[in-house]
Image (cartoon, rainbow, N blue to C red):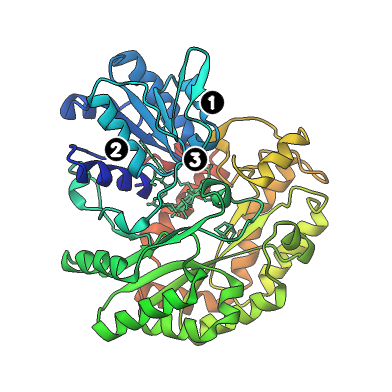
Amino acid sequence: MLQGVLYVAAAAKAAGHRTTVVIADEHDIGKYIHSYKPDILGVSCVSATYPIARELLKSCKKLYPELPSIIGGHHATFMYKEVIEETGVDYVCRGEGEEVFVRLLDSLSHGNSFPAIPGIVYYRDGTYHNDEQIALLEDLDGLPLITRDLLAPGFTFSPKIVSSRGCPFHCSFCSISSFYGGSYRQRKVEAVLADIRNYLDWGFTQFWFHDDNLTVDVAWVTEFCNRIIAEGLKFRWNCMSRVDSIVRHPELLALMSKAGCSLCSIGIESGIPEVLERMHKKINLQDIKTAIKILDRNKISHNWYMILGSGDEFDAPGYIEQNIRFFQSLHLGYVLISILTPFPGTELYNKIKSEGRLLHYKWELYDAAHCVYQPLGMSPKALEAYLPKAYLRVYLSKGWRLIPMLYKSFRSKAMNPSTIAAGLWALIKTRFLGKTFDQALKKN
Ligand code: B12
Ligand code: SF4
């Protein structure tokens, strides 16, 4: 369940509206519309799942022409013109939806279907209205609590924590900085702890931080951890961090471990210094090795992201091999390997598009398992073929160390065996059974 839509639903509920969140496609949305009789249909997606959202919106427009609809998320924010044109959706939410969606509901309830709300885009009389800016919240402390009752019965609820939004870095393949206009905003420690206490009261003991980069503000994390320890709050938590923060602040990792952090997910992306430089990653190979030692020393499991491809002349077999060899050489935890994908809103997308090297707009293939651009030094298929090979080589290079690593992670609940099994099954379906990403996500 995408967290963003839950936040939007929670904000609408807090403003006095009735909301229900479901996971649906064009085939089963009808039954929810019949049961809940909504006044508006809100949809969320990323690029890879946009085709599901598109078919759903198109079929709803046909079957329920009077039902207004709105879509949000990163893909819709950057591709709003195409999205409106292809789906017939009434509104696109560009940016954060909590405030602007509630303002739209108010306008609709007063009979105004074409309000001037920056970020709520609609097409009328040959013009896109309200599309000049991406809506951002001024203050994250007013964020509502995500509660189980937002979901329709039968959907599983696992609470996530968002303590900040945005990131001060500008990695070329990531849409965070353009989505949040380069801003980084935090909630107060007390507000985050209040969410956590609520979830603990309901019996949850394990949380994922959905922050893009939890360790941006060392003072914030230090205060947060000290409060957890002082109040004796018992729970495990996982987060996303960066190599440079870990190396610069090893003492912070020791404190995070003491406060229950069991897993850090970190983007290494490449083992080639020039590629890291061009990605604006701002990390170096020595620091990667040091960060791993610090995490191991503090008994925090680690999960590393690796990207095959660079978008420039480093897209050649020799460099891909060099990249894989670097990952094989590391004393690693989990490794998640992606094919470089130019997502809308990123510097990479603009570059590849302006060079005429985007192969197509089959968004279901923008799943980081397919190559959707023309590499300079090899074929797209040859780059894709490295994905299963890289997985095998990187994991087999760990040999027997894989067994204690898996055992430790399962015991500490840093990794859930069923999530790993589902991930592997989706990988097998996309890579070896010829399924697209959205087909792989479906149960049958
Ligand atoms: C956590 C996360 C995941 C988790 C999701 C778990 C979950 N249950 O949500 C996992 C690991 C599963 C995941 C998977 C993937 N992810 Co991801 N993920 C994220 C991450 C880091 C946080 C998401 C989040 O909770 N954000 C916080 C919420 C509050 O923000 P939000 O979702 O944008 O929602 C706000 C607005 O967009 C808007 N909004 C959103 N929907 C709607 C709907 C309506 C009606 C309205 C009005 C407004 C609205 O209002 C919301 C509240 O402000 C984001 C980065 C980010 N900061 O968003 C990447 C991100 C969303 N993921 C991304 C990608 C590419 C993927 C994968 C395709 C990667 C892959 N190789 O498989 C898959 C796709 C999975 C899928 N089927 O959707 C990209 C999307 C880019 C794109 N254009 O597609 C992002 C932006 C990362 C990036 N830097 O590029 N992801
Ligand atoms: S990849 Fe991570 S560090 Fe880089 S801009 Fe995105 S969120 Fe920030």
Identify residue type, mark 3.
Answer: Ile
Identify residue type, mark 2.
Answer: Val
- Estimate the x, y position of residue 22 in percent, counting from the top left: 27, 39
Residue 436 seen anywhere in this rendered image of the structure: no
Q: Which mark is residue 102?
A: 2
Frontmost residue, 165 versus 419: 165
User: With respect to residue 342, does 194 lie above or below?
Assistant: below
Q: Residue at x 57, y 37 (%)?
A: 365
Q: Residue under label 3, please give it.
A: 134
Using the numbered discs, state the Cα–Cα distance from disc 2 to disc 1 in whole angstroms. 22 Å
Q: Secondary structure at mark 3?
A: loop
Q: Residue at x 41, y 69 (%)?
A: 238
Q: Secondary structure at mark 2?
A: helix
Task: For marks 1 and 3, give the one nearer the viewer.
Answer: 3
Residue 122 seen anywhere in this rendered image of the structure: yes
Count of residue discs: 3
User: With respect to residue 319, does 90 lie above or below?
Assistant: above
Q: Residue at x 21, y 42 (%)?
A: 15
- Estimate the x, y position of residue 84 in percent, counting from the top left: 48, 23
Identify residue type, mark 1.
Answer: Lys
Which of pointers 2 and 1 lies earlier in the amino acid sequence? 1
Give the class, few, some or many, for how many residues have Cα within 10 Å of label 2's Cα (few <14, many ≥20).
many
Q: Residue under label 1, please give it.
A: 81
